[in-house]
Image (cartoon, helix red, strand yellow):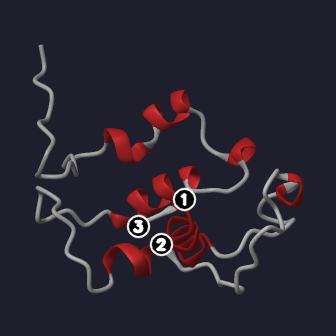
Amino acid sequence: MGANDIEQIVCVFRILGSPTVQNWPGFQNTPDYGKITFGHFRAQPFRRILFDGVALPIKNSNYENKGQMINFLSKHLLYDAGKRIEASSALRHEFMTMEPTPFLDYKYRRPRNH
């Protein structure tokens, strides 16, 4: 997490790669485009960021279906808002309905079924 706006932008670039006309059509038309120049960053595979050497606090330690988590996140973490998954589709995504439920074990209480 960045300590300020510029550091946060760099954190995003390090994960998603630098914005281009291919991954964010029209980014060069944003109000602050060109005010600051950043180096070129290559996008990192989500699998590497999430699972290589990082212990996520997933409650179900036997959670093995990481592919659905990566697929779910990759549909959200896009520069081009028009290509992001819609909320209704996200709720129906397999990651949200699969068992065992891979909820995080801290700062979150799983809702009780009524």
Callouts 1 and 3 close, C-beta under 8 Å: no
Nearest to the observer: residue 98 or residue 86: 86
Callouts 2 and 1 close, C-beta under 8 Å: yes
| Residue at image point 55% right, 78% down | 14
> How far from the left and from the top, in percent, is residue 63?
20, 62
Q: Secondary structure at mark 2?
A: helix
Residue 46 is labelled as 2
Q: Quadrant of the N terminus?
A: bottom left
| Residue at image point 68% right, 56% down | 79
Pick whichever of labels 3 and 2 is earlier in the sequence: 3
Q: Which residue is mark 1?
A: 74
Q: Which residue is mark 3?
A: 3
Q: Quadrant of the C terminus?
A: top left
Marks 1/3: CA–CA distance: 25 Å
Callouts 3 and 2 close, C-beta under 8 Å: no
Marks 3/2: CA–CA distance: 23 Å
